[in-house]
Amino acid sequence: MRIDILTIFPQMFPPVMGEGMIRIAQENGLVEIKYHDLRDYTTDKHRSVDDRPFGGGPGMVMMCGPIFRAVEAIEAQSPVPARRVLLTPQGQALKQALVREIAKEQRLLLICGRYEGFDERIRIGLEPLEISIGDYVLSGGEIPAMVVVDAVVRLIPGVTGHPDSPVKESFSEERLLEYPQYTRPVEFRGMPVPEILRSGDHAKIAEWQKEQAKIRTARRRPDLLS
Ligand code: SAH
């Protein structure tokens, strides 16, 4: 998979993309991530990417020109067509099902907004998939883009150590939250590990985990069960 990220702050990404699973996935050639500075696609001496909104109102709006030029130039770098993704609070809510969908793509182009958002013709002309990471407003699309990359990369086959780990976790196909997990020590500050997990009876353990997942989901996220 190739992921291109278009942003006015490309320097925000390497520290995050350079650690953990995302770093290893890149080192193993499972994903290639490239950052593109939107200001490289400007035409004036101030390298402007934003301008005042028609009709008035507060703040600035991201202009069409630099984004269209950048998208066309970045897409031309490889013959594989890119799925264009606009990060915006007005987009489709990011859920694990959507992550699974976009993880199937061979190429993603993530476009990060700033200021008050995008000129509407960026939506009309580029027909991107619009994704929101939640019902709150951030100052830019960079952190949402990192969220998308992190969620997607760990689903690429070969990235997680155990092939089952993305299957048996919260929001997986079973639509249950994950069951409680424990590791050593057996007792910590008076809190023991449930006896059953140390019984070695795999069928019983699986039954207990399923039951716990249901209880936890019913308490915390009843919406997932309906
Ligand atoms: N005025 C806009 C918000 C702009 S926030 C509105 O009312 O909808 C500036 C940029 O941050 C957005 O263009 C988007 O790229 C990013 N952003 C902010 N919140 C986000 C969210 N919840 N999900 C995805 N992107 C977000």
Image (cartoon, rainbow, N blue to C red):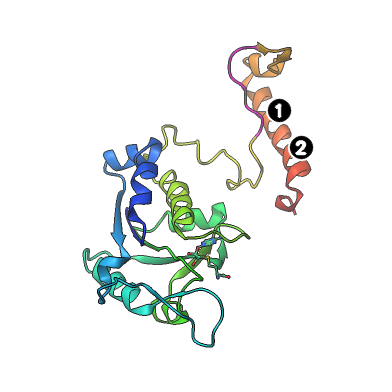
The residue at the point 55 percent across, 57 percent down is 133
State the count of labels: 2
Give the residue pinned by disc 1. 208
Asked if residue 30 lies left or right of residue 86, the reply is: left
Amino acid on which disc 1 is placed: Trp
Quadrant into which the C terminus falls: bottom right
- Secondary structure mostly seen in magenta is loop
What secondary structure is found at the residue carrying circle 1? Answer: helix
Give the residue pinned by disc 2. 215
Dot 1, how many residues are within 10 Å of its Cα: few (below 14), some (14-19), or many (20+)? some
Does the magenta segment cover residue 197?
no
What secondary structure is found at the residue carrying circle 2? Answer: helix
Q: Can residue 157 be seen in this view?
A: no
Q: In the rendered structure, find residue 120 and report the number of the disc placed on it.
A: none
User: Which residues are drawn in magenta?
Assistant: 179-186
- 50 is higher (above) or lower (below) than 20: below
Asked if residue 178 lies left or right of residue 73, the reply is: right
Asked if residue 6 lies left or right of residue 189, the reply is: left
Report x, y in % for residue 184: 58, 15
Report x, y in % for residue 172: 58, 46
Report x, y in % for residue 43: 25, 76
Dot 2, how many residues are within 10 Å of its Cα: few (below 14), some (14-19), or many (20+)? some
Tell me the quarter of the picture where residue 112 sits.
bottom left
Amino acid on which disc 2 is placed: Ile
Q: Is residue 79 visible?
A: yes
Does the magenta segment cover residue 183?
yes
